Image: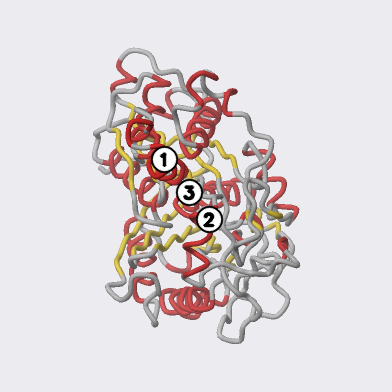
Amino acid sequence: MERRVVVTGLGLISPLGNDVRTNWEAAVAGRSGIGPITKFDPSRLATHFAGEVRNFDPATVMDPKEVRRYDTFIHYALAAAIEAVADSGLSFDGELAERTGVVFGSGMGGLEAIEENSLILRERGPRRISPFFVPRCIINSAPGLISMRFGLHGPNYGTVSACASAGHAIADAMHIIRRGDADVMITGGSEATIMELAFAGFNSAKALSTRNDDPQGASRPFDVDRDGFVMSEGGGALVLEELEHAKRRGARIYAELAGAGMSGDAYHITAPHPEGKGAALAMRGALRSAGLNPEDVGYINAHATSTDLGDVQESKAIEEVFGDHAFKLAVSGTKSMHGHLLGAAGAIEAILTVLSLYHQVMLPTINLHNVDPECRLDYVPNEAREVRGLKAALSNNFGFGGTNVCLAFRRFD
């Protein structure tokens, strides 16, 4: 019999707040976390706003002497993991330390360190490059430091698949527990790209919104007036646990991670497949993996980046997978509130999906005033919706390179 996997701990830091409770309250209230960029002078750029993490001191999660040795994406990963472990109530003594692992994703990793050290190299020469440059950059430093923090000896690695990175990390962690290679996994993703280099690149690709006169209204998935995504930062962590292990210790169970589906578009390096083929394959795979029928799903936290092509293709893919039931379920674009955390998007959206099931609340798509005629579903416009009997929900994440992942969560009673 296949081992079942449940969610027993959550941790989150994002533009909406620096813990899970604050994020959830903001999302239910439909508040935006987007504002003018304060971390650098954006005047040379086309986009002057972002979803910044505010009032966060990394010295609260690591020795102040260590802070400069690690990139901001690592600070966020560690902060989220510490909250998630505390929330789970686990302590890693004896054999459990060997049966617990970490899989954590990031799309860009230590871009901050790359930008900083490339200037040092040019201006001051190779001998002035920090010996911590490489550990600051590499994405597996995040899961590595999380494992060191808690003394964990189970499977440990990072996932890198653009905006699907955290989703893939969560899916991999589920499979590790299912096949018996661990009993507990800490998983999720983090990203820190609020810097001029990243914005210059995405502006050149015409991917970012330039609605500088209305930052909080800039991320508007499924709206006919959308003009690109809003870049954000942060980190999210989930503690996944084998069901019987969680029950034996009397753990609070938020939801069951019932399945995951993955696919590739095989179409274009940045544009989605025109018929949403990869997205549809990922959703079908998640349903099959979870043993769910399409009509079991009542809610989807969509990838919904607020880009011209992406929102339409995802909507079409949902229609293809769910048929007539697509018009009975609800679809949220929560990036309208927290922006696009790139490689960490799958973590924050998985956490919000889990809490939606746990609290029986469908989160809103804010800034949705003129629905694109090609987007024909129920997008929970502007206000959260309390429901009863929500049994299962999906969380979608798609990335550059045509990589797709869908997580299927089931309400746990």
Residue 35 picture location, percent across and down: 71, 54
Classify mark 3: helix, strand or loop. Answer: helix
Vertical arrangement, residue 381 with respect to residue 176, above or below: below
Task: Say which of 311 and 8 sits in front.
Answer: 311
Amino acid type assigned to the residue bearing label 3 in the image: Ala
Measuring 39% from the left and 27% from the top, which residue is drawn there? 145
Q: Which residue is mark 2?
A: 391
Q: Residue furthest top?
A: 94
Measuring 70% from the left and 60% from the top, which residue is drawn there? 385
* Disc 2 from disc 1: Cα separation: 49 Å
Which of the two discs, 1 and 3, labels the residue nearer the N terminus? 1
Q: Which residue is mark 1?
A: 117
Measuring 53% from the left and 59% from the top, which residue is drawn there? 199
Q: Nearer the viewer, mark 2 or mark 1?
A: 1
Q: Are marks 2 and 3 in contact (CB under 8 Å)?
A: no
Residue 109 picture location, percent across and down: 41, 44
Q: Which label belongs to residue 158? A: none
Q: Which residue is mark 3?
A: 344
Task: Say which of 337 and 411 sits in front.
Answer: 337
Amino acid type assigned to the residue bearing label 2 in the image: Lys
Classify mark 1: helix, strand or loop. Answer: helix
